[in-house]
Image: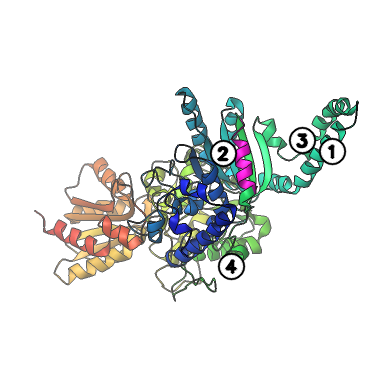
Amino acid sequence: MGRILDTINEPRDLKRLSKEELINLSQEIREEIIDVVSKNGGHLSSNLGVVELTLALHFVFDTPVDKILWDVGHQCYTHKLITGRRNRFKTLRQYKGIGGFPNIEESSFDIYNTGHASTSLSAALGMAVARDLKGEDFYIIAVVGDGSLTGGMALEALNQIGHLKKKLIIILNDNEMSISPNVGAISGYLNYLVSGQFFRRAKELTESAVKSIPAVGRLMFRVTRRFEEAVKKMLIPGSLFEDLGIKYMGPVRGHNIEMLIQTFYEAKKYNGPILIHTVTRKGMGYIPAQKEPSKFHSASPFDKKTGKFIVKDSPPTYSSIFGKTSVELAERDKRVIAITAAMPEGTGLMDFSKKFPNRFFDVGIAEQHAVNFACGLALQGYKPVVAIYSTFLQRAYDQIYHDVSLMNVPILFCLDRSGIVSDDGPTHQGIFDMAYLRPFPNVIIMAPKDENELRHMMYTGYLENRPVFIRYPKGYGIGIDIDKEFRVTPIGKSEILKDGDMGVIISIGSMVYPCLRVAQKLEREGKNLKVINARYVKPLDTELLLELSDNYNYLITAEEGIVNGGFGSAVREFFDSKQKYSMKILSLGIPDVILPHGKREEILKLIELDEESTYRRIKNFLESK
């Protein structure tokens, strides 16, 4: 007998299945997800936790007429498997394959791109208002992780949802984790709701018993209602949401398909906003992921029999070097405080959190708060080190300007995952940071060529009395020796790596070593180029740039960032301001396109920024008239 999964081509195929068949299908889906993610890598824990929840939603609702928004989208694998993408699922996160997040260009069942957290409630409310204005009738369901609910945008949306009271279903997927274990008062409140389900059941039984008393039962019930309202906020689960004007149902066991289906049918009867609190377990059905859900959040390939990751003999990652350096700085100075936004493991701060628990703060998925929180600490004399992925720091753009730049607050920002971030696709590419940070006054922006230079830049930034941003890539370092002692990287000064007389390459960050190898190859062909490690995006080494303009005819800039407004633009703008150069300039970087998911090497080749393409483009540039 074949798999039930092989008969599911679209959600309507679920509706003919029995309860037992749905349970068997859940197991088949888990096996498929584990098999593919073990080979391709991907978000395992979160997806194993929502299998039954996803099947129940598609069983009850009529998608894509009814619309499901996933927040965060890294819990959408089951959704993709049953919405016509089963045969392509083995291409998950591969170049030209299906993405690991919802993508409106990939399927009509994906109605909103959700690679960042806390966005779905606002979008869902907008869709609900549009639906009602057009006189249409369908359901909108936002599946929100408990981590997403900590984001300020989600709370802003809840405020208006309760005010407008549009027909909208919110599924709160509560697994007590976003990526790492959740923190904060909201997480504590959700834990309280789960523990309060016994009280809710007891209350329902008591009400029923009181009403059944002959003659006086209903009168007694009405009298006690006032007292009930007085204690409601202390005792009854969901009172926070109900006080906001949102009906609360739950908690519901998130791995019981029959209970979920029954609850969703009941929710369809309500003509206003309703929140269904489901309790799930990350990694459900795969013991290694259940035991260590954080490690299997965004997993690299692993042996599915043992759960052990396939690790090659490689240099340390930039994240691990950042983490170790943070600990060293904290050992030197009690004022050093580490802050991250739900990424203690991903950023490399776990050792710091264990050694200095009183000086480590995970603020949850709340990047805007993280920045302002750091401002308050810095203005009181502390030395905050804020570790946030490049793509996620974009969410705090106004805070960087209004609260950091204008007040010239000395904070060290470390931007992990800068540049191309391969398999996670468009929402996670860290390619805009140089362009979006460069216009701000007072800031210093650096990018190391290797992991050893990262250490020294962190030390330099720690000493500075200005906002400092250091961008560095995902993955392994170059593998060079690490200096034991720190040294200062002179502010705004570049480093000459190779001399030459025909032209000059000024590269920054991850492009330095590839450009050096390209220059060495060109030298063997008689084209001798000077190679410079810029180190700083801001301030530029203007003294050296003026010297270059007097002595060279060809200048090439290279960066793993967006060309528009990036490092190369900064160099051109400087020369334009001086109105005195006659050099030909070639700017190599990421063009004005949306980068797909795929291996970093594949993306670099696609945009002609890989080493071979860089060699060809520079050679053609030097030979052009």
Comparing 563 with 1, the one in front is 1
Which amino acid type is marked by label 2? Ala
Q: Secondary structure at mark 3?
A: helix
* 218 left or right, relative to 277: right
Give the CA distance from mark 1 to mark 3: 18 Å
Q: Pinpoint residue 624: horizontal percent, then vertical percent.
A: 11, 55
Task: Please tell me which residue is depicted at 82% across the width and 40% down the height of the picture.
Answer: 205
Q: Pinpoint residue 204: horizontal percent, then vertical percent.
A: 79, 38
Give the CA distance from mark 4 to mark 2: 31 Å
Q: Which residue is mark 2?
A: 154
- Check residue 288 in the rendering and tell me which mark sits there, or answer none: 4
Which amino acid type is marked by label 3? Lys
- Label 1 packing within 10 angstroms: few (<14), some (14-19), many (20+): few
Which amino acid type is marked by label 4? Pro
Q: Which residues are magenta?
A: 259-270
Asked whether the beta carbons under mark 1 and mark 4 sit within 8 Å of each other, the answer is: no
Q: Specify which label sits upstream in the sequence, 1 or 2.
A: 2
Nearer to us: label 4 or label 3: 4
Q: Specify which label sits upstream in the sequence, 4 or 2.
A: 2
- Check residue 233 in the rendering and tell me which mark sits there, or answer none: 3
